[in-house]
Amino acid sequence: MLKRIFPILVFFLLLSCGKSEKPVVSFYYWKTIFKFSKTEKEVLDENNVHKLYVRYFDIGLHPENKFPIPISPIRFEENPKEYEIVPVVFIQNKVMSETNLDVNELAQKTFDFIEQINSKNKITCQEIQIDCDWTLKSKTNYLKFIEVFKKLSKKKLSATIRLHQVKYFKKTKIPNVDSGVLMYYNMGSIAPDSLNSIYDQKIAAKYLKSLKKYPLRLNFAFPIYSWAVHIRNNKVIGLRSKINSKALENDPNFEKTSPIFFKVKQSNYKNGVFYEENDLLKIEEIKTTDLKEMAKDLEENLMEKPKEIIFYDLDEFNLNNYEKNTFKQIISCF
């Protein structure tokens, strides 16, 4: 009898393992005007996306009096009623580094402005996310801000987390939030070398083993954007957004000299930027193979699976570089 029952038990055990819940696909929306293109809407529908992390505004310092000010608040041209909206506020680290910062006032004004945007656009939110790459110098103000903001908002609160904050959490501390989002990108320095500053597996590997010790539950943000590092006389003079290999390969003003480098053949203007003859553009982009590699490396170093994978960011230019089912492929790795 036992010999008959045992294989059946094993079968059901394997079946239950196979049905473990996969993360859901979400996106960051990082434009100042909220309106979907046809491609963006199709990708949302194709991937059963129900949640969008929408950048509401940045907070920086006034150039003269150094008081915190909101920068480039979002304007909604269509109502996002089909989606759960999570307002995201990006706070520049220099704001939190100010020694005379009135943290209570900043938290109150930040929450009031979020509520004002929500009220104007008839949005009800259950969660708010604070995005700040805090440091040892700014951590006291930042951690206090999170405490005050959480009490004010009475909502679920999440925070972005960087790799260095995971590895050295005993020094950088952990904000009192309900969950974190590990920003799995912007790992290296922007330089004229051949390395990709957006994603580098070797750099990531130095931090991965720390994930199992990190006490805060994490979801993950993956990059799907690209940019070009503009180099002149072996010095970086700027970052050029929304440029990829495809855009330069079809432009007679640029000559491909390696898989990632393009040389300016003749001085020209492109997208409002002047490129001088012999300038170099280093393309930094993320391929589907990179996204799968990220997912595999993370999956092997986790105590528990993420509930969400959030792709940065929802923009037609970015989406056109991937097959529609790419995002489902990535979450299937977990």
Image (cartoon, grey):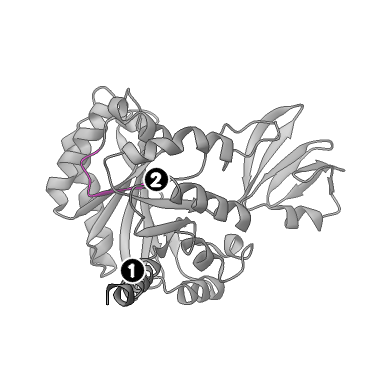
Q: Amino acid at mark 1?
A: Leu
Which residue was labeled with disc 2?
Answer: 182
Q: Is residue 12 left or right of residue 273?
A: left
Q: Nearer the viewer, residue 86 or 300?
A: 300
Which residue was labeled with disc 1?
Answer: 13
Residue 139's tag is none
Q: Amino acid at mark 2?
A: Leu
Q: Position of residue 296 (x, y in %)?
A: 51, 52
Mark 2 or mark 1, earlier in chain: 1
Q: Position of residue 280 (x, y in %)?
A: 77, 37
Span shown in magenta: 175-181
User: Which image quarter is the N terminus in?
Assistant: bottom left
Q: Is residue 140 left or right of residue 255?
A: left
Does 218 lie within the magenta span? no
Nearest to the eye among marks 2 and 1: give it: 1
Task: Determine the residue positioned at 38% across, 32% down.
Answer: 167
The number of discs equals: 2
Q: Position of residue 234 (x, y in %)?
A: 74, 27
Task: Determine the residue positioned at 64% across, 45% down.
Answer: 240
Task: Give the SS element for disc 1.
Answer: helix
Q: Nearer the viewer, residue 291 or 275?
A: 291
Does 180 lie within the magenta span? yes
Question: How many neighbours does mark 1 have within 10 angstroms: few (below 14), some (14-19), or many (20 or more)?
Answer: few
